[in-house]
Amino acid sequence: MDSHQQFKQYDKTKSPKSEKTQKISGEQYFSATPSSCDERRTLHVTLRNHETVVQVSNGVFSASKLDLGTSVLLKHAPKPPENGKFLDIGCGWGSISIAMGLESPEAEIVAVDVNERALELTELNAKNAGLKHIRTSLVDDALKENNTLEFNNFDLIWSNPPIRVGKEMLHDILMTWIPRLKVGGAAYLVVQKNLGSDSLIPWLAANLGENYNVEKYASSKGYRIIEVIKTK
């Protein structure tokens, strides 16, 4: 089962809840087409010391503010290369992609998500920030066989992965995308400590194998940043 199918399965098997509860649980963020009303709101955020105005909406992760985990990642991840091919896994409204784009205007940045509304917002926010080097893709489109070369050989991955989809699905997502690093490429993942960051490090090391170096890169505000480097 691929990562997009697992996201779909997660959405279909959730129990009926009020929209308010769905927003709190975050479950609807993993739906391809959120059922909540698309009510756009404007946020003023700081992304890697860049003051930016973005649009957010219901049914997309972190719909009211820049979430703490992403904030920790953007504050502590090392400066990205000036150019190369970068990936944002689960882009939401585009906070990580836009931060990458502002830091590395010569890079090619790919933002993937299963949520169509999230991709629309990322495209809009990138356009409004004057970033023409960010492109988006649905996960199922990116994983099609004829797109293997296009969505591969990444120099850098930054992600606040969707921990709450469950361990099995999370593992599948990470094992789908991290091996798409090029040799010498690096991934930086932010994971909350009480949601399993410390156990995820040895799991990644064991499952990625000897061609990868996995370790804790930084800690802040209850979050760990995990560094994965593809060594050969």
Image (cartoon, rainbow, N blue to C red):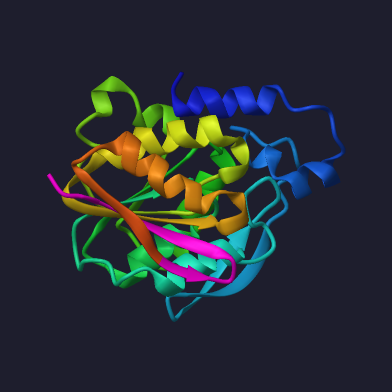
Residue at image x 84%, y 46%? 20
Q: Position of residue 199 (x, y in %)?
A: 49, 47
Q: Give the range drawn in magenta.
A: 218-232
Q: Which SS does the magenta portion mostly show?
A: strand
User: Looking at the image, which residue sits at the far top?
Assistant: 1
219 within the magenta span: yes
Instruction: Decide: is 172 above or below 120.
Output: above
Is 32 in front, or is 10?
A: 10
Q: Position of residue 209 (x, y in %)?
A: 25, 37
Residue 38 seen: yes
Instruction: Decide: is 113 above or below 191.
Output: above
Residue 91 seen: no
How many labels sit on residues? 0
Q: In which quarter of the image is residue 80?
A: bottom left
Horizontally, residue 39 falls left or right of residue 209, namely right
157 within the magenta span: no
Q: Where is residue 67 in the image (x, y as percent from the top left)?
A: 61, 63
Is 36 in front, or is 8?
A: 8
Q: Give the position of the C terminus as an image quadrant.
A: top left
Q: Position of residue 51 (x, y in %)?
A: 49, 79
Horizontally, residue 84 falls left or right of residue 187, namely left
Q: Quadrant of residue 22?
A: top right
Residue at image x 39%, y 45%? 202
